[in-house]
Image (tube, helix red, strand yellow):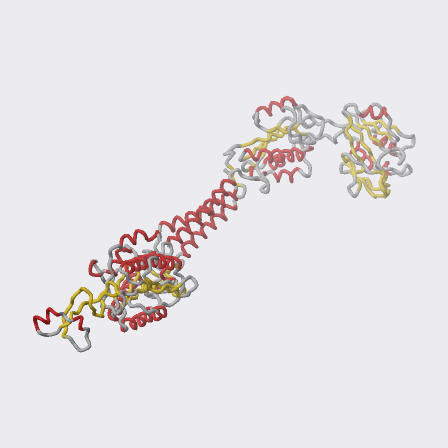
Amino acid sequence: MSAYGALLDAVRGVHWGARRAVTSPVAGTHHSKLRGTSAEFTEYRLYRQGDDPRRIDWRLLGRSDRAYIRLATDRAVLPTTIVLDASASMAYPVTTRAKWRRAQEITIGLAAVAHADGDPVGVAVHDDRGNMRILPPRTRRGVVSEIARVVDGADPDGLDPLAPALASIRSARMVVVTDLLGDADDLLRAARVHIVSGHEVHLVHIVAREELDPPHRTMLASDPEDPTLQRVLVDTTRIGYDRQFGDWRAEMARRWRAAGAAYVEVVTGEAASHAVRRIAEPASTVSTGAVRA
Amino acid sequence: MSWLLPSALGIAAVASIGAIALHFIARSRPLAEPLPTARFIPQRPVHARARSIAFTDLLLLLLRVGAILAIGLAVAGPMFGSRGRVARVVLLDRSRAVGSAAELRDSLGASSRTSDVVIPFDSAASIGAAAPDSVSLTGARGSLSAALAGATRAAVRAASRADSIELVLVSPVADEEIDDATARLRATWPGRIRVVRVRAAASAAVAPHVEVRADPNDAVAAGLSLMGATAPGRAVRVVRGLLGVADSAWARDSGHVLLHWPASDSAAEWTRRSTIDAIGGVTAGGATLVARFPRVWVLEGTAMARWADGEPAAVEHTTGNGCIRDVGVLIDQASDVTLRAPFRRFVSALLVPCGGMRSARPASALALASLAGTGTLASSDAFRDPSTASSPWTPWLLALGALLLIAELAFRRSMSRAA
């Protein structure tokens, strides 16, 4: 946990507001679809049979001879689950594992922000035996530390798809931290189900700098999740690679946004705290979209 | 500089060329490196021709070639210790063929240095003998074969401190010093020989007058008398019975030749053969006597006569300044073989002075040229035993090769990790 100390300090004060009104009955910091009698006045409504007479604004009645009741906006919590991709493609580059490291930091950073907002937060990640480890959303004091332990205990070396995990989780807000190099289509399909259900879905697309700009030398590139896939990267094929990879990333961003998710591309060169801010407070940062090479 | 195993240099060169070729050939198919986004690379054949040479590739090649060359040099065994140094071996003839010892010493002083190896020789070569200045003549017959064998032994010792070895022969090079083995031994010396010829001794003519102690009707005595050789008080005495103390004492005088030629098998106390056989001929000095002779004894010594099957029939032993010849040829007293000319020729060979007939006639020019030879000095490499010789540089070169191999391995792994 001490490894994330600087990150947690950097994201202190960041608020992660809901993108739309939530329907949680538990009081929290997000705007609730349910209207109640909190102190924040929003509007008057004509009294209808069945309303609580104690909600009648008597002053307005005296002025207008009509019975109105006061309506106020309620705030609710937004249970959040962060789904972390632990496939083999996340362990890149081989020496630094920058993609995995950045994904871990973003997961911890977002968990801390959500927890600071009073929202229950949990995590789902495949462990080293390939089993999906799910920590249900909690608001208790040490939940961020628990999430950090679960995340640190995972190792990106499997080929397990994320879509089934996403399909099995029920949270009002879900964040998928992935490089989209696995079951991207199935993942989008599962995310659409949640979006249609009224849940909030964020897609954090992790891209390594070395994937945007591979070493400038002849290399026989091999997919770590499919060793039979080998391609020669030379000067003449690099142009095609840059174009295809860029087009694919743009397509992913378009499709996820079109589905109603919040799409953010994070390159490993970007500081984790900055990425967390972009995800949680998109209006307060410079860029909010995909970063093309 | 010389090499213990020069062929290793060629092998190392070929291996280096092979390593260089494999380095560039292998690079056309680089090692697979992980890249999760490899699917976006347009598909091309794996053996693409495009190449880019990096400094790290050249460094790796240099490490590999350096290791191969270092190991090859180590196996080749460089010898730097004696650059261009020439060791000299001087064969000094002190045999009876030399006419003057003073001339011999003068010639030695003019043709040698204090660091040279001087090997005096007569019938045998003496390595590590007395100081050259004290060399004196012996009465023994000289042998160039023994001298050449001694020179080879000395050259083996000198090979470790010189690149080349010069052989100098200070001798009259007389005919009697050359035997059947001389040419073969000369062929084993891998270089030219400088011959410093000194004056030969005058040949002494041998008068065939002998003193015979035998029974009155002795057949050998009769044959000798027919030769006109019998006369008392001469340098040659033939004793047909057992030798006495006086005979042995007489033989030790200078120039005396005592022939112990038993008339019967009881007249000598030599070692008897396990089985007594008979043989049909005996040869001495080119003369052959054909008859049936019983062979009773086994004789050891310098052969003066041989049976038909090569076994010594008469041998010579040096005693004091003279010699005793044991003649194991039993002649039947009733035989007339001693009355014939072949017997006279046969006996003449047995009556020569001690050491054989002195023939100080100088060797022919052809024989001398053959002995001297042409070409360069003998190389030290020819005298080094490849199985035992070792270069002091070999361990260091092997260590260098090992270090370079370790560096190549470490560098290759660091390159893989960086990739």
**Residue B67 at x, y percent in the picture:** 46, 46
Frontmost residue, B415 versus A236:
B415
Frontmost residue, B263 versus B145:
B145
Frontmost residue, B57 versus B167:
B57
User: Which quadrant of the rendered structure holds the C terminus of chain B?
Assistant: bottom left
Q: Specify whether A135 is left or right of B180.
A: left
Q: Specify whether B390 is left or right of A155.
A: right
Q: How many labels does the image show?
A: 0
Indicate whether B143 appears above or below A89: above
**Residue B297 at x, y percent in the picture:** 84, 38
Q: In which quarter of the image is residue B220?
A: top right
Which residue corresponds to the image point at 60% horizontal and 25% vertical from the top-left? B108
**Residue B406 at x, y percent in the picture:** 46, 47
Which residue corresponds to the image point at 43% horizontal and 47% vertical from the top-left? B63
Can see residue A213?
no
Q: In which quarter of the image is residue B249?
A: top right
Indicate whether A211 appears above or below B306: below
Indicate whether B254 appears above or below A74: above
Which residue corresponds to the image point at 81% horizontal and 27% vertical from the top-left? B236
Q: Specify whether A148 is left or right of B138.
A: left
Can see residue A127?
yes
**Residue B145 at x, y percent in the picture:** 66, 35
Pick out the residue farthest to the bottom. A49
